[in-house]
Amino acid sequence: MEHGRQVDLLNCADEPIHIPGSIQSHGALLFFSADGALAGWSANAPALLGIELALGSPYSALALPVAALELMVDYIDPEDGETTPTMVPVSVQGAEFDCIVHAGCGRVIVEFERREAPADEVTLFAVKAHGSIERLRRQKSIEGLLASAVDQIREFTGFDRVMAYRFRPDDSGDVVAESRRDDIVPYLGQRYPASDIPTQARRLYVLNTLRSIVDIGDTVVPLLGAPDAAPLDMSYAVLRSVSPVHIEYLKNMGVGASMSVSIVINGRLWGLIACHHMAPKLVPYSIRMAADVLAQVMASTIHSLESRSEAQVIERSASTRTKLIEDLLIEDDPLETFERFADAMVEVTDAQAQVTSYYGKLRVHGDLPRELAEAIVATLPESGHDLLVREQRADWPEAIRERLGKWVGMLALPFDPASGGWNIVLRVEQIEQVAWGGRPEKIVAMGPLGERLTPRGSFDAWFETVRGHAHPWEPTIVANARLTLAELVRVMASRRAQTEATRAQLLAMLGHDLRDPLHSINMAGMVIEKGNSQPTIGRRIQSSTSRMQRMISQVLDMSRIDGGLGLGVTLEPTDLRALVEDLIDEARLAYPAIPFQLVCDERAMVNADGGRLGQVLSNLLSNARHHGEPGKPVRVCVTTRGREAVIDVSNAGAEIPPDVAATLFNPFKRASLNNPRNRTGMGLGLYIAQQIVREHHGEITYRHDDGEVIFSVRLPLL
């Protein structure tokens, strides 16, 4: 029968540690074919068990303890072919053993592990171990759970040192809790590289969650069997011998015996309880199983705590995502919407800054320099459609790495590739002082098997400063970002379809609304051609051309807004009171029948584009004139409130219905308002007015108060 092969660190990653072909010497092992015929045994089995063995003998013919034979009955020809271990205590030749039986890979394995502690003492310790379960369940944090666990496991197993490892995404592990003898060196806070646990060892830690090494100086016992037989898979065997590389590793740590208990969550090795003793130590199987049960309780509790934390993250993310999408469907400018949600987006992603790019414009939230934000956006693919994740400086294009400073972590969502629309959240560099458990590099040294790569000989803390890495993006945050991206793409596609429909509607309306003034001009031309010199002809031509000019100007403004170009305001110090007085004087001259009243006129200096701001106020005065009750005044008030200048334009009128009020600042509202006194409007006025006010860093709002419709414009004071 083939045995395991000699290994060192050059090939330990490929070492077949599940088929070593030998066992530890503190017990004996027999293995049978699925039908119960003896297929092999450990070399010490005949002497230790006091029986004669021959290949092919039926299990029932062997002079084994009755309890062991009765236990084996359940494992011969099992229906599923895979059966978990079961233990029964037995006596053989005056010595006490724990008989463990399990099956797998077409073999039935019977192990006899020597037990030095009397049965009543084992029972007492096992009861004490099970009493620890409730104490663990009551822990409210993972840190508290692990700290409590190492204390309790050390108490009922008697090991000199018990440590809790927590593995990172790169499979390196940190000692996050420790209980130890006062006279031994602490390992708490140290990190161990992923290479300390090769891949195949990590696999066994998941398959078989408990591993016991009784004596590091032990001499292994070979397995005997038919020369042409397949090697025995000992993945679940408690007596499986130990890799020579691991033995050397433990010797370098000064350890005489060890036990490990895996913490497995969703099939992944989350952590490990590692127990060390400075001398050989055999912990009875029942007590080890109690520790294993404790680890399962820990895994369940940790999973519950992590799930609760993830659920809170998911809930906050879903709430933010829903509100963001709702506002994007209503608001005209995505940049404004993302800026308004910047705090929430940064919080749910545990980031420190946000950058939004749209049609070449940028909005930056956080202490990120604008020049760097522009450079970061320039590194993004032009046609990117998928989430882009960067976690360290090395993930970035080489040309920008030196400019990044502390901003090395990035999660970028291409919400509208056609317009260069990206929403980016950034994390800062986490400068970390890592205390490695000895230098993690492999070194060439003279080992027991000659000159070769050998496990490190020193486990004194070796400190390294790690730079250029941000905290890795958590799977939950990345998953939520993908959901957000899918929703953003959907809503932006909807907006694009709506824009196309709006453009078609605009062309149709423009063609219809230009027909009347063109017809008036045509008729006036015919009258002039016939020599009629009525004085009203000139006014009609002037009025018609003014209407056409206004409509064309609005269409051009809307085109600039939809194209992301903005309206191109030029801000300069402006006396708001003087601007309002001039506009009211013009309105009184043009419409002498309408009472325009300036009811308050505080002096207010603002940064403004006088022409564009006049366009806003003219639109509000026109709306008040068209929609106000006939004969009632249009009131204007200029005041200052805190650091803002406020212009209120009001007219007597009924409250606008809520469903109409919700769309007041959307284009094409003529059908919604349906006022016969505004037949020539295209519903673009308030839409354009809102964009102008936003480019002044202000706000325009509607309210109804005491029988009056009031539109307010707020602008920051100088």
Image (tube, rainbow, N blue to C red):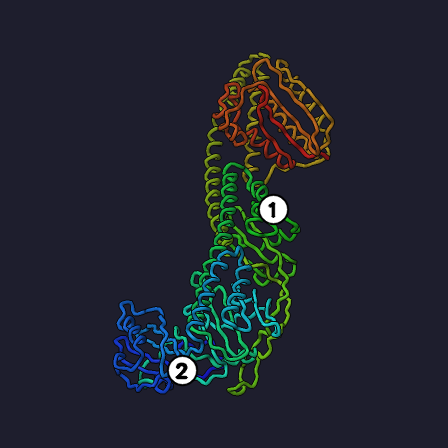
Task: Please name the residue that numbered disc 1 is placed on.
Answer: 362
Quadrant of the snapshot with the C terminus: top right
Q: Report x, y in % for residue 316.
A: 52, 46
Q: Report x, y in % for residue 464.
A: 63, 69
655 with respect to 580 (left or right) = left
Residue at the (35%, 70%) spot, across then down: 86
Residue at the (39%, 83%) spot, across then down: 3
Q: Report x, y in % for residue 105.
A: 32, 73
Mark number, residue 22: 2
Q: Residues within 10 Å of mark 1 (few under 14, many from 20)?
A: some
Judge by depth and name the residue closer to the eye, 89 or 7.
89
Q: Does residue 528 sit above or below 199 in this rendering?
A: above
Three-letter code for the amino acid on which mark 2 is drawn = Ser
Q: Is label 1 in a helix, a strand or a loop?
A: strand
Three-letter code for the amino acid on which mark 1 is drawn = Leu
619 with respect to 78 (left or right) = right
39 with respect to 645 (left or right) = left
- Res. 585 image quadrant: top right
Residue at the (73%, 25%) spot, across then down: 602
Marked residue nearer the N-terminal end (1 or 2): 2
Q: Report x, y in % for residue 293.
A: 43, 64
Q: Residues within 10 Å of mark 2 (few under 14, many from 20)?
A: many
Single out the mark in the foreground, 1 or 2.
Answer: 2
Q: Cα distance, mark 1 to mark 2? A: 67 Å
Judge by depth and name the residue closer to the eye, 711 or 459.
459
Q: Is label 2 in a helix, a strand or a loop?
A: strand
